[in-house]
Amino acid sequence: MKRVATDTQTSSPRRSANGYMPIEDYGLIGNMRTCAMVATDGGLDYVCWPQQSNFEPSGAIVAAPTFSLPEDIGGSRNWDYRYSWVRDASFTIYILLRMGISHEAEAYTSFIFQRMKEAKARHGALPIMFTYYLGGTDIPEVELEHLEGYRGSRPVRIGNGAAFHVQLDIYGECMDGIYLHNRFGKPVTYDQWLSVREIADYVCTIWQEKDMSIREVRGMKQNFVYSKIMLWVALDRALRLADKRSFPCPHHKGYNQKPECFIQSYESNEVLDSAVLIAPLVFFISPTDPRFLKTLDKILKAPDKGGLTSTGLVYRYNHSLSDDGVGGREGAFSMCTFWLVEALTRVTGAYDEKHLRDAVSIFENMLSFGNHLRIFSEEISRSGEQLGNTPQAISHLALISAAFNLDKTLNEKR
């Protein structure tokens, strides 16, 4: 915020002794790039450049233009913030885009993608902060002992030791910023997607590690919950981006090209498991993705044809192909059957008549296996009897979700 001298300021009884008017006598004007506070007497008192933390030559967004201003007057929490933190800058992207300041958002996105390319040399690790001019990471922390500091707040520090921290949450913030830029700004290119995929693969290798997190603690590394949440965000946003843009996605281990379906596990890579029906329900993959549609078609087949569906009921997996260490037999799973209904509903939207008819038919058939109170157990036997513990909460949760989505789709069609 900057005070500017103007010739339009006039004396006014409303102005205080220091020359300023009460705040209610000001109006705010702007064009989303600069703004000004204009007094009712015509005085132009303040001009603000909201993008002043953006370093135009590189596109880096600086955390603050100052250093060693204390967090506690007279205390020692005095840090140098004249650098570009991945976390802070990534949070900024969304606000810039929503305010219509797209140029700065695009500039920073280009800046961070360049840093992501450089991360390959570090086996995928992304530094938590950079210098704003060249994107450097050599930021040693030095105490200037000859300076007193603001109001006696010592030590005065330049550089920042946090630059050498392990802060794993940054991958979530970074991916979220890229995802939002793709959604509200400029679409991500294929070359940029390759960098996203590299980071996603790296996150898969470090998500169980300890770090210093957003608090930038200078003690022991810990399993910070915030970091765990943001690591999930990193993978979630990478997968969402892949599905929205039809980019090649890191599904290669979970999808077997030979039987053309998602599999039970990396180890059991030829076993079909109805648990993968959850994938489009949690937005792991688009319900119309060819890989999921092929998986869905296989699940809908009868068990003797390699599928998992019999008389409208869905089994978990083929026990003759997968040893779960328990032995014995089991019935069809109520939850998985309702998941199938919801998956079919999500595939259909309001346009695919066949899948919609199948969803309605399987749902109505499944309801007939409830007892007189419409209560469901965990499983249904081949003879139609309820098996397992009852009432089974997750069976009813799946029922409600399937009913909600099916009703919504049918109403849209009407």
Image: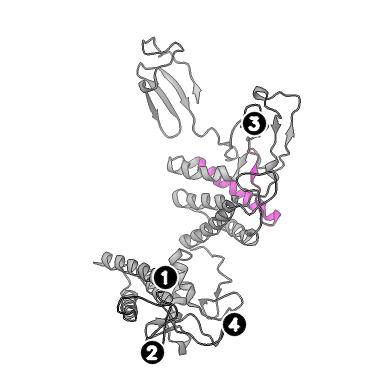
Any magenta on residue 414?
no
- Farthest residue toward the left? 414
Magenta segment's dominant SS is helix
- In the picture, residue 164 is in which quadrant? top right
Q: CA distance from mark 4 to mark 3?
A: 61 Å
In the rendering, at what x and y percent does residue 54 appear? 55, 36
* Residue for badge 4: 325
Amino acid type at circle 2 is Ser
Q: Which mark is residue 26?
A: none
Q: Mark 4 or mark 2, which has the lower sequence index?
A: 4
In the rendered image, residue 146, in percent from the top left (x then y), is placed at 76, 24
Kind of residue indicated by mark 1 = Ala
Amino acid on which the number 4 mark rests in the picture = Gly
Report helix, strand or loop for mark 1. helix
State the extent of the magenta-drawn residues as a range.
Answer: 104-132
Secondary structure at badge 3 equals: loop
Q: Earlier in the sequence, mark 4 or mark 1?
A: 4
- Calculate the distance from the C-alpha at mark 4 to the C-alpha at mark 1: 25 Å
Which residue in the protein does label 1 denote?
A: 393
297 horizontally vs 254: left or right = left
List x then y, in percent, for residue 362.
34, 79
Which amino acid type is marked by label 3?
Answer: Phe
Q: Residue at x 43, y 40 (%)?
A: 100
Residue labelled with disc 3: 67
Is residue 126 one of those drawn in magenta? yes
Tell whether label 1 touches label 3 (CB within 8 Å).
no
Q: Secondary structure at mark 4?
A: loop
